[in-house]
Image (cartoon, grey):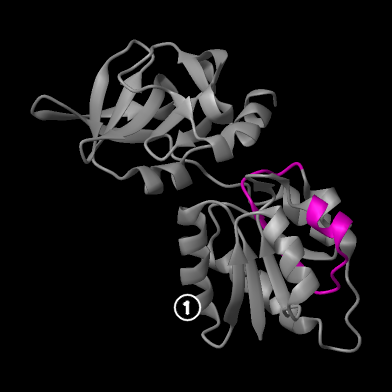
């Protein structure tokens, strides 16, 4: 079997690749991309795979526009941090809808469903599939251990406004402007906090929605956020993340 992966977040791509290798060693990843445009080109020029794993929020828009432009009959397993697109997903040949961070049991269920499609009497129960969307919502991290001086203190995620890396270390900025050291890396933290409240604006910085006060345009189609508390970084949104960042702030 072959699959494609459409994913614009490197940590999520690495996690899914690892889980697939463990669950189905014979499943070959024939193509991966982080954009709508390159996927459409691949659908026009390459043999279609047995299954596509697709994120929904991509750097250049929502993945649904891929299948509005180029029809694809192969099954799609959506992998996303957002639960509001479930019904729309099942209108474009989706067989499952996995919420990030993806768990091994959920991926196994989806793969088993994919393999069951070859059985001649398979009757898809769409009501059960829709119900699955409402069940098993991901549990996000509620606390970190933060270092202050020689002590380690539990700190609630809701009390933080920024999480960022600087000089090889990971720091958190509280709503009161206090800087704390976290014993974790930014990529893993990003997977464990609620994407409704948090957004990674660039490689070094994740911000909380309550920290945003203003958006200012910047050179080369980028934007700078005015945050409170401001912190020590520039608060600049990467160009490829501007559209998604604005959509996140307007939800």
Instruction: Note whether 224 is above or below 102 in the view shown.
Output: above
Asked whether 247 or 112 is in front, the reply is 247
| Above-or-below relation of 214 to 43 | above
Looking at the rendered structure, the secondary structure element under dot 1 is: helix
Nearest the camera: 184 or 39?
39
Quadrant of the frame with the N terminus: bottom right
Q: Residue at x 76, y 62 (%)?
A: 40
Could you say which quadrant of the image residue 171 lies in? Answer: top left
Report if residue 89 is visible in the image: yes
Name the side, left or right, on which 216 lies relative to 229. right
Please give left or right for residue 83 compared with residue 198 in the image: right
Q: Is residue 60 left or right of residue 176?
A: right
Q: Position of residue 16 (x, y in %)?
A: 53, 65
Q: Residue at x 49, y 78 (%)?
A: 21
Tell me where residue 240 sits by quadrant: top right
The reply to whether the magenta stretch includes residue 44 is no
Q: Horizontal and vertical percent for residue 228?
A: 43, 11
**Which residue was labeled with disc 1?**
22
Q: State which quarter of the image contains the C terminus.
A: top right
At x 34%, y 32%, the residue is 164
Q: Is residue 226 positioned above or below 110 on the image?
A: above
First to last magenta residue range: 65-84
> Which x, y percent locates residue 45?
76, 75
């Amino acid at each position: 079997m072959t699959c494609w992966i459409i994913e614009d977040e490197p940590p999520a791509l690495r996690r899914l690749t690892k889980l697939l290798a463990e669950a189905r060693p014979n499943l070959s990843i024939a193509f991966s991309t982080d954009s709508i445009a390159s996927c459409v080109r691949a659908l026009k020029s390459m043999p279609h795979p047995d299954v596509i794993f697709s994120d929904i929020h991509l750097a250049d828009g929502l993945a649904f526009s891929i299948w509005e432009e180029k029809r694809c009959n192969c099954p799609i397993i959506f992998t996303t941090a957002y639960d509001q697109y479930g019904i729309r997903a099942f209108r474009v040949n989706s067989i499952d809808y996995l919420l990030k961070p993806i768990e091994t049991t959920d991926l196994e269920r989806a793969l088993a469903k994919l393999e069951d499609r070859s059985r001649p009497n398979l009757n898809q129960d769409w009501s059960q599939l829709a119900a699955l969307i409402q069940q098993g919502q991901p549990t996000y991290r509620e606390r970190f251990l933060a270092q202050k001086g020689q002590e380690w203190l539990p700190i609630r995620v809701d009390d933080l406004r920024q999480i960022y890396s600087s000089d090889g270390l990971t720091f958190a900025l509280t709503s009161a402007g206090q800087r704390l050291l976290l014993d974790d890396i930014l990529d893993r933290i990003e997977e464990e906090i609620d994407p409704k409240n948090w957004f990674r604006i660039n490689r070094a910085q994740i911000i909380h929605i309550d920290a945003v006060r203003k958006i200012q345009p910047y050179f080369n189609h980028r934007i700078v956020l005015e945050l409170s508390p401001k912190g020590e970084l520039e608060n600049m949104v990467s160009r490829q993340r501007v559209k998604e960042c604005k959509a996140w702030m307007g939800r």
